[in-house]
Amino acid sequence: ELKVEQNPLFLSMQEGKNYTIYCNYSTTSDRLYWYRQDPGKSLESLFVLLSNGAVKQEGRLMASLDTKARLSTLHITAAVHDLSATYFCAVDKYTGNQFYFGTGTSLTVIP
Amino acid sequence: DAGVIQSPRHEVTEMGQEVTLRCKPISGHNSLFWYRQTMMRGLELLIYFNNNVPIDDSGMPEDRFSAKMPNASFSTLKIQPSEPRDSAVYFCASSFRGLPQHFGDGTRLSIL
Protein backbone atom coordinates (compact mmCIF):
# COMPACT_ATOMS: atom_id res chain seq x y z
CA GLU A 1 0.00 0.00 0.00
CA LEU A 2 1.30 3.43 -0.91
CA LYS A 3 1.97 5.57 2.16
CA VAL A 4 2.32 9.33 2.18
CA GLU A 5 3.83 11.04 5.19
CA GLN A 6 4.00 14.73 5.89
CA ASN A 7 5.97 16.58 8.47
CA PRO A 8 5.54 18.47 10.51
CA LEU A 9 1.91 17.78 11.36
CA PHE A 10 1.57 21.12 13.09
CA LEU A 11 3.55 24.25 12.37
CA SER A 12 3.35 27.58 14.11
CA MET A 13 5.50 30.29 12.63
CA GLN A 14 5.87 34.03 12.85
CA GLU A 15 5.06 36.34 10.03
CA GLY A 16 8.04 37.05 7.85
CA LYS A 17 9.77 33.75 8.52
CA ASN A 18 10.58 30.96 6.08
CA TYR A 19 9.79 27.29 6.51
CA THR A 20 9.49 24.03 4.59
CA ILE A 21 6.88 21.29 4.74
CA TYR A 22 8.01 17.82 3.68
CA CYS A 23 6.08 15.09 1.92
CA ASN A 24 7.54 11.59 1.63
CA TYR A 25 5.91 8.73 -0.21
CA SER A 26 6.65 5.04 -0.26
CA THR A 27 6.50 3.94 -3.88
CA THR A 28 7.32 5.17 -7.34
CA SER A 29 5.14 7.94 -8.65
CA ASP A 30 5.71 10.77 -11.08
CA ARG A 31 2.76 12.89 -10.06
CA LEU A 32 2.38 14.82 -6.87
CA TYR A 33 -0.23 17.36 -5.89
CA TRP A 34 -0.46 19.99 -3.16
CA TYR A 35 -3.76 21.16 -1.76
CA ARG A 36 -4.80 23.81 0.71
CA GLN A 37 -7.77 23.54 3.07
CA ASP A 38 -9.08 26.43 5.14
CA PRO A 39 -11.05 25.58 8.30
CA GLY A 40 -14.52 24.36 7.43
CA LYS A 41 -13.84 24.63 3.72
CA SER A 42 -13.07 22.35 0.82
CA LEU A 43 -9.69 21.39 -0.59
CA GLU A 44 -8.21 23.73 -3.16
CA SER A 45 -5.59 22.58 -5.65
CA LEU A 46 -2.34 24.53 -5.35
CA PHE A 47 0.30 22.76 -7.41
CA VAL A 48 0.63 19.83 -9.78
CA LEU A 49 4.14 18.39 -10.10
CA LEU A 50 4.44 16.00 -13.00
CA SER A 51 8.10 15.06 -13.29
CA ASN A 52 11.35 14.73 -11.42
CA GLY A 53 12.85 18.12 -10.68
CA ALA A 54 9.58 19.96 -11.25
CA VAL A 55 9.33 23.25 -9.43
CA LYS A 56 6.24 25.43 -9.24
CA GLN A 57 5.83 28.79 -7.53
CA GLU A 58 2.80 30.86 -6.65
CA GLY A 59 3.29 33.92 -4.51
CA ARG A 60 5.04 32.97 -1.29
CA LEU A 61 4.71 29.23 -1.90
CA MET A 62 7.09 27.09 -3.90
CA ALA A 63 6.74 23.35 -4.42
CA SER A 64 9.33 20.91 -5.75
CA LEU A 65 9.51 17.22 -6.53
CA ASP A 66 12.37 14.73 -6.32
CA THR A 67 11.01 11.42 -7.56
CA LYS A 68 14.25 9.57 -6.90
CA ALA A 69 14.12 10.53 -3.23
CA ARG A 70 10.30 10.17 -3.23
CA LEU A 71 10.14 13.60 -1.66
CA SER A 72 8.28 16.79 -2.29
CA THR A 73 8.71 20.04 -0.43
CA LEU A 74 6.46 23.04 0.01
CA HIS A 75 8.51 26.08 0.90
CA ILE A 76 6.97 29.12 2.48
CA THR A 77 8.77 32.41 2.08
CA ALA A 78 8.12 35.39 4.37
CA ALA A 79 4.94 33.94 5.78
CA VAL A 80 1.83 36.05 6.17
CA HIS A 81 -1.29 35.38 8.20
CA ASP A 82 -3.35 34.58 5.09
CA LEU A 83 -1.28 31.44 4.58
CA SER A 84 -2.70 29.89 7.74
CA ALA A 85 -4.43 26.68 6.60
CA THR A 86 -3.91 22.94 6.39
CA TYR A 87 -1.75 21.77 3.50
CA PHE A 88 -2.03 18.30 2.02
CA CYS A 89 0.17 16.51 -0.45
CA ALA A 90 -1.23 13.69 -2.55
CA VAL A 91 0.30 11.09 -4.82
CA ASP A 92 -1.40 9.05 -7.50
CA LYS A 93 -0.15 5.53 -7.99
CA TYR A 94 -1.84 5.02 -11.30
CA THR A 95 -2.09 8.01 -13.53
CA GLY A 96 -5.35 9.82 -13.27
CA ASN A 97 -6.96 7.64 -10.71
CA GLN A 98 -6.68 6.99 -7.04
CA PHE A 99 -4.96 9.61 -4.93
CA TYR A 100 -3.19 8.87 -1.68
CA PHE A 101 -3.29 11.85 0.64
CA GLY A 102 -0.82 12.75 3.34
CA THR A 103 -1.91 13.46 6.89
CA GLY A 104 -1.86 17.20 6.34
CA THR A 105 0.21 19.97 7.91
CA SER A 106 -1.72 22.52 9.94
CA LEU A 107 0.03 25.86 9.52
CA THR A 108 -0.61 28.81 11.78
CA VAL A 109 1.11 32.10 11.02
CA ILE A 110 1.35 34.35 14.04
CA PRO A 111 1.43 38.12 13.58
CA ASP B 1 -17.80 25.90 -14.76
CA ALA B 2 -19.93 25.39 -11.66
CA GLY B 3 -17.47 23.02 -10.06
CA VAL B 4 -18.37 19.88 -8.15
CA ILE B 5 -21.77 20.29 -6.54
CA GLN B 6 -22.71 18.40 -3.41
CA SER B 7 -25.97 18.28 -1.53
CA PRO B 8 -27.02 18.69 1.13
CA ARG B 9 -24.38 20.95 2.70
CA HIS B 10 -25.43 19.94 6.18
CA GLU B 11 -27.37 16.94 7.41
CA VAL B 12 -28.42 16.17 10.94
CA THR B 13 -30.34 12.99 11.56
CA GLU B 14 -30.96 10.38 14.19
CA MET B 15 -29.16 7.10 14.48
CA GLY B 16 -30.73 4.38 12.38
CA GLN B 17 -32.02 6.67 9.66
CA GLU B 18 -31.01 6.38 6.05
CA VAL B 19 -28.76 9.13 4.74
CA THR B 20 -28.21 9.92 1.07
CA LEU B 21 -25.50 12.27 -0.08
CA ARG B 22 -25.46 13.55 -3.65
CA CYS B 23 -22.78 14.71 -6.00
CA LYS B 24 -22.69 16.26 -9.45
CA PRO B 25 -19.16 16.14 -10.91
CA ILE B 26 -17.68 18.67 -13.27
CA SER B 27 -18.95 18.10 -16.79
CA GLY B 28 -16.45 16.10 -18.84
CA HIS B 29 -14.65 14.61 -15.86
CA ASN B 30 -14.50 10.82 -16.05
CA SER B 31 -13.41 9.96 -12.52
CA LEU B 32 -15.38 10.55 -9.34
CA PHE B 33 -14.23 10.05 -5.76
CA TRP B 34 -15.96 9.96 -2.39
CA TYR B 35 -13.91 10.89 0.68
CA ARG B 36 -14.63 11.12 4.37
CA GLN B 37 -12.77 13.53 6.64
CA THR B 38 -12.61 13.37 10.43
CA MET B 39 -10.23 14.78 12.99
CA MET B 40 -9.21 11.32 14.11
CA ARG B 41 -8.68 9.62 10.76
CA GLY B 42 -7.99 12.52 8.42
CA LEU B 43 -9.00 12.27 4.78
CA GLU B 44 -10.04 8.76 3.73
CA LEU B 45 -10.93 7.59 0.24
CA LEU B 46 -14.14 5.59 0.38
CA ILE B 47 -14.70 4.66 -3.25
CA TYR B 48 -13.93 5.89 -6.71
CA PHE B 49 -15.52 5.50 -10.11
CA ASN B 50 -13.99 5.62 -13.55
CA ASN B 51 -16.40 6.18 -16.42
CA ASN B 52 -19.30 5.48 -14.02
CA VAL B 53 -17.87 2.08 -13.02
CA PRO B 54 -16.77 1.49 -9.40
CA ILE B 55 -13.06 0.71 -9.48
CA ASP B 56 -12.06 0.45 -5.85
CA ASP B 57 -14.46 0.37 -2.91
CA SER B 58 -11.99 -1.03 -0.40
CA GLY B 59 -12.29 2.13 1.65
CA MET B 60 -16.00 1.72 2.27
CA PRO B 61 -16.22 1.08 6.01
CA GLU B 62 -18.85 -1.63 5.98
CA ASP B 63 -21.96 -2.88 4.28
CA ARG B 64 -24.00 -0.02 5.65
CA PHE B 65 -22.30 2.17 3.05
CA SER B 66 -23.12 2.00 -0.64
CA ALA B 67 -22.40 4.23 -3.61
CA LYS B 68 -23.79 4.45 -7.09
CA MET B 69 -23.08 6.38 -10.23
CA PRO B 70 -26.00 5.83 -12.61
CA ASN B 71 -24.65 8.30 -15.16
CA ALA B 72 -21.73 10.63 -15.80
CA SER B 73 -23.35 13.56 -14.05
CA PHE B 74 -24.62 12.11 -10.79
CA SER B 75 -23.49 9.97 -7.90
CA THR B 76 -24.91 9.06 -4.50
CA LEU B 77 -23.41 7.80 -1.28
CA LYS B 78 -25.89 6.11 1.00
CA ILE B 79 -25.60 5.09 4.62
CA GLN B 80 -28.24 2.74 5.97
CA PRO B 81 -28.61 2.48 8.89
CA SER B 82 -26.59 5.46 10.06
CA GLU B 83 -24.60 5.45 13.30
CA PRO B 84 -23.05 8.28 15.36
CA ARG B 85 -19.55 7.21 14.32
CA ASP B 86 -20.49 8.04 10.73
CA SER B 87 -20.50 11.73 11.64
CA ALA B 88 -17.92 13.43 9.43
CA VAL B 89 -17.50 15.70 6.44
CA TYR B 90 -18.02 13.81 3.21
CA PHE B 91 -16.37 15.18 0.10
CA CYS B 92 -16.95 14.34 -3.50
CA ALA B 93 -14.22 15.07 -6.05
CA SER B 94 -13.87 14.62 -9.79
CA SER B 95 -11.00 14.62 -12.23
CA PHE B 96 -10.10 14.03 -15.86
CA ARG B 97 -7.10 12.00 -16.96
CA GLY B 98 -4.67 12.79 -14.20
CA LEU B 99 -5.51 16.43 -13.81
CA PRO B 100 -5.86 17.40 -10.16
CA GLN B 101 -9.00 16.32 -8.42
CA HIS B 102 -11.53 19.09 -7.89
CA PHE B 103 -13.40 18.90 -4.62
CA GLY B 104 -16.93 19.88 -3.79
CA ASP B 105 -17.77 21.92 -0.71
CA GLY B 106 -18.58 18.79 1.26
CA THR B 107 -21.53 17.55 3.28
CA ARG B 108 -21.23 17.96 7.04
CA LEU B 109 -23.06 14.96 8.48
CA SER B 110 -24.07 14.66 12.11
CA ILE B 111 -25.71 11.49 13.39
CA LEU B 112 -27.32 11.91 16.79
Image (cartoon, grey):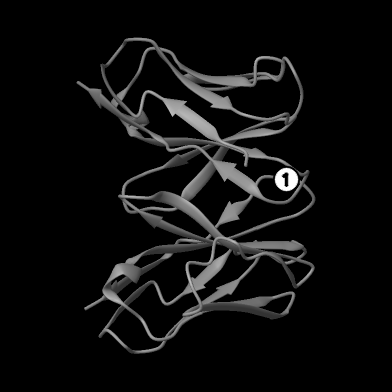
- Give, as a three-letter code, the residue at label 1: Leu
Residue pictured at 58% horizontal, 21% vertical? A72
Q: Position of residue B27 (x, y in %)?
A: 72, 67
On screen, B52 above or below B97?
below
Q: Position of residue B44 (x, y in %)?
A: 48, 54
The answer to which image quadrant residue B29 occupies is bottom right
Q: Chain of mark 1?
A: B
Residue pictured at 62% horizontal, 65% vertical? B57
The answer to which image quadrant residue B12 occupies is bottom left
Q: Residues within 10 Å of mark 1 (few under 14, many from 20)?
A: some
Residue pictured at 25% horizontal, 85% vertical? B14
Judged from the image, the secondary structure of the residue bearing numbered disc 1 is loop
On screen, B8 above or below B1?
below
Which residue matches tag 1?
B99
Q: Nearer the viewer, residue A107 or A17?
A: A107
Q: Nearer the viewer, residue A19 or A99?
A: A99
For the N terminus of chain A, the image quarter is: top right
Q: Nearer the viewer, residue A31 or A94?
A: A94
On screen, B56 above or below B12?
above
Compared across the picture, whether A4 is left or right of A6 comes to right
Residue pictured at 21% horizontal, 78% vertical? B112
Q: Position of residue A92 (x, y in %)?
A: 68, 41
